[in-house]
Image: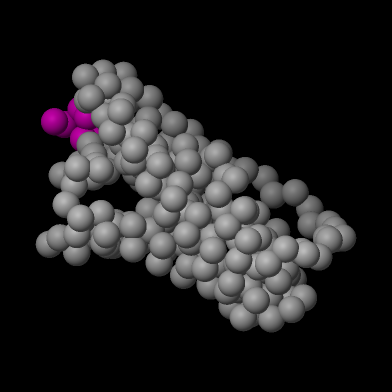
Amino acid sequence: MIFIYLFIGIIASVISALPLGASNIAVINTTLKQNARQAIKIAIAAGVAEVILSYYALHCNDAVKSFFYDNLWVQISIAAILLGVGLFLLFKKQPESREKKTKRFTLSKYVTGFILGILNPPVLIYWVIMYGVINSSDFMLSLKSSFLVLFLFFTGVYLGKLLTLYFYSKLSVILSKKLTAITGTINHIVGVLLIAIGVLQYLKIYIM
């Protein structure tokens, strides 16, 4: 049963990594302009950055956990944010694709991946919200959780980020030709997932 935390980490990380961001685009560009081996270096370092951000968010989450439980409006607000972001992604119109000239990275691919992964405030906010969702369910995560629970969860976070970027690398050729269409599909998927989580959060609040 304890291994469920591994899968929770993977799922939460995949949802975080699916929308096209700086790391995803860097992986795609590197695969197309160089090779998949160089792109995986970016993914490996970006995975480490994701773990650091999720750990820091968990640290922040410990500080606000009691506030979350004592104030119903906070739980309702989080559910509303999830629904709002989900609806935005679901109905967001994609801009027409345009060719852009990109500068080649002169930094190490590991350094590039780490920098792109760590300098990502929206991801930090995402993890704070996600911990609120997780801790409002039957699963509990905090820095006081057992070492095995934290190890499994953060291993899942790393694997989720790495596998998602690996997926982007493998589909980079298709993405380069149909980037707008694929971006729209991914946004729709993430939007539906966030809406589902938001609805479940509302149901939990009012049923319980």
Is residue 168 among the parts visible in the rendering? no
Name the spot of residue 192 as percent of width and height, x first: 44, 49
On screen, residue 37 versus residue 100, left or right, reads left
Can you tell which quarter of the image residue 77 is in? top left
60 or 136, which lies in front? 60
Dominant SS of magenta comes to helix
Residue visible at 57% across and 45% down in the picture: 120
Residue 118 placement (x, y as % from top left): 55, 49
Measuring from the top left, give residue 32's x and y in whole percent: 73, 76
Colouring used for the render: one colour
Please say if 174 is above or below 9.
below
Q: Is residue 111 visible?
A: yes
Assign the C terminus to one quadrant of the image.
Answer: top left
Question: Is residue 9 left or right of 183 when viewed as pictured?
Answer: left
In the displayed structure image, the side of residue 102 where residue 133 appears, left or right = left
Q: Is residue 155 magenta?
A: no
Identified at 38% across, 58% down, the residue is 157
Q: Residue at x 44, y 50 (%)?
A: 52
- For the image shown, how many numbered marks are present on the structure? 0
> On the image, which quarter does residue 91 sit in?
top right
Q: Nearer the viewer, residue 97 or 21?
A: 21
Q: Residue 146 at what x, y percent from top left?
A: 16, 52
Q: Residue at x 19, y 64 (%)?
A: 3
User: In the rendered structure, which segment of residues is drawn in magenta?
Assistant: 203-208
Split into 4 quadrants, where in the image is the N terminus?
Answer: bottom left
Q: In terms of image quadrants, where is residue 180?
A: bottom right
Depth check, front residue: 146 or 4: 146
Q: Is residue 204 magenta?
A: yes
For residue 195, above or below residue 172: above
